[in-house]
């Protein structure tokens, strides 16, 4: 066990004040003192620092009859623009997004599954330079990627299907662009996006389930993302539903839930039964709306399978909310009721009926806002350190 020195305390108190101001635009200094229980001189020193760095601003309010004029504080999210990089299996998206979640520009590049470390580095650097030339000031870089990612080590360890990419260190990017660079698994980054800008804003504990090419998860406990160890956390997609006779997974396990209930697996199953070709989620949605019996029964069964896995996760974590994200949100009207019913039926003494299950609020931008939120999260947790290394 380690104690806390002055520096840690300074960082922690600055972070507390900063988060409070961010979540309560228009808050006064005196309310900050009351809500944090910090002394007025400490609050004054912290706010002085944040004002000096342009992180917050303070504007005078209506003058009251007696005493001093109140001053109102606000987080200056628009002063901080992040170069966000969202990697997926077949493309990389680049965007300029500020700490308020405002998106200024997006570019999408199709990539090959043969992409190597060197090619990825060159691609990111090239676009960073292009964005910096066009928009000027960039504060930091945030990267999200599928697969196994170690945020503490700043490494993309491996991505299924991208065999030439391994142990990609984001510090290589930092060396060239000379800005802080952070990386995180995509589902974890999306959980942060929901915590700051979506349906995770008003709860302390929630679980994000990304259903797309695979299935991923992000766990937020007491308003902090749970990062796990070994570059692994929230890997719901690789919980086995049939460990003896199940389909073999890339991960080495058998019967992983994502092989049955990812958006791709569901599309394939319906396509096979209907002998249809090129089925998309939009087309599947139309079929489900028309109450196509085959499509409905497959989607319901596969959603209940996800529900069953979530029962185990919920029994352990008992989150207040489960947020479904990823491409599958297009058909979430047909998935969520099955998950809810399963949670109600099979969770410990039925407590699962109290868990809200909702579809992501951020729609197709969750991934990019997630990549930016990796930086925002780091900034809010360690504002002092962040500003010092800039
Ligand atoms: Zn697996």
Image (cartoon, helix red, strand yellow):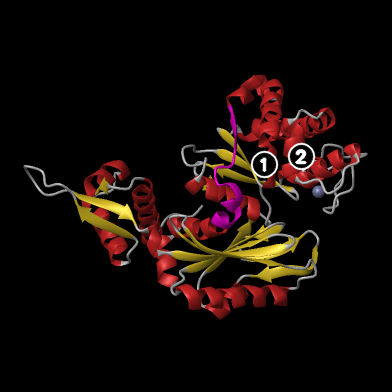
Residues at discs 2 and 1 in contact (Cβ within 8 Å): yes
Q: Residues within 10 Å of mark 1 (few under 14, many from 20)?
A: some
**Residue 133 placed where, x, y %?**
49, 78
**Residue 274 placed where, x, y %?**
88, 37
**Residue visible at 52% across and 73% down?**
131
**Residue 29 placed where, x, y %?**
23, 49
Q: Does residue 368 show up magenta in the picture?
A: yes
Ligand 1 is within 8 Å of the C-beta of the residue at disc 2? no
| Mark 2 or mark 1: whose residue is earlier in sequence | 2
Depth check: give the residue in front, 251 or 117.
Answer: 117
Q: Does residue 142 show up magenta in the picture?
A: no
Direction from residue 141 to residue 250 in the image, left or right: right
Depth check: give the residue in front, 60 or 164.
Answer: 60
Residue under label 2: 284
Kindly report the distance in space between the C-alpha atoms of the residues bearing marks 2 and 1. 9 Å
Which residues lie in the magenta part?
Answer: 355-370
**Residue 224 placed where, x, y %?**
52, 47
Q: Quadrant of residue 270?
A: top right
Q: Quadrant of residue 47?
A: bottom left
- Secondary structure category for the residue under label 1: helix
Residue under label 1: 330
Q: Quick check: 325 above or below 173?
A: above
Q: Which mark is residue 209?
A: none
Ligand 1 is within 8 Å of the C-beta of the residue at disc 1? no
């Amino acid at each position: 066990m380690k104690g806390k020195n002055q520096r840690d305390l300074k960082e922690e108190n600055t972070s507390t004040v900063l988060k409070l101001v961010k979540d309560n635009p228009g808050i006064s200094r005196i309310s900050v003192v009351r809500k944090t229980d910090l002394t007025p001189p400490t609050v004054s020193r912290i706010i002085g620092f944040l004002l000096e760095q342009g992180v917050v601003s303070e504007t005078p309010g209506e003058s009251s009859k007696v005493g001093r004029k109140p001053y109102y504080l606000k987080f200056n999210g628009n002063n901080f623009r992040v170069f966000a990089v969202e990697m997926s299996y077949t493309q990389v998206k680049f965007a300029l997004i500020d700490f308020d979640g405002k998106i200024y520009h997006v570019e999408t590049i199709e990539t090959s599954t043969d992409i190597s470390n060197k090619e990825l580095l060159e691609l990111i650097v090239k676009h960073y330079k292009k964005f910096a030339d066009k928009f000027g000031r960039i504060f930091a870089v945030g990267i999200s990627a599928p697969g196994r990612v170690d945020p503490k080590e700043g490494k993309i360890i491996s991505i299924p299907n991208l065999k030439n990419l391994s142990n990609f260190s984001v510090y290589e990017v930092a060396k060239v662009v000379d800005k802080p660079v952070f990386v995180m698994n995509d589902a974890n980054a999306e959980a942060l996006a929901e915590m700051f800008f979506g349906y995770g804003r008003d709860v302390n504990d929630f679980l994000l389930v990304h259903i797309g090419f695979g299935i991923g998860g992000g766990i937020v406990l007491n308003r902090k993302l749970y990062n796990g160890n070994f570059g692994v956390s929230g890997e719901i997609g690789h919980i086995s539903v049939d460990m003896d006779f199940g389909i073999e997974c890339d991960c080495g396990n058998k019967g992983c839930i994502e092989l049955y209930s990812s958006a791709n697996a569901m599309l394939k199953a319906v396509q096979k039964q209907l002998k249809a070709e090129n089925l998309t989620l939009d087309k599947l949605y139309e079929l489900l709306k028309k109450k196509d019996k085959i499509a409905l029964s497959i989607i319901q069964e596969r959603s209940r399978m996800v529900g069953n896995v979530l029962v185990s996760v919920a029994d352990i974590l008992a989150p207040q909310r489960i947020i479904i994200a990823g491409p599958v949100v297009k058909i979430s009207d047909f998935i969520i009721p099955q998950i809810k019913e399963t949670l109600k039926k099979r969770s410990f003494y039925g407590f699962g009926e109290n868990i809200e299950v909702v579809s992501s609020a951020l729609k197709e931008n969750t991934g990019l806002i997630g990549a930016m939120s990796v930086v925002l999260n780091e900034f809010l947790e360690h504002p002092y350190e962040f500003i010092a290394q800039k």
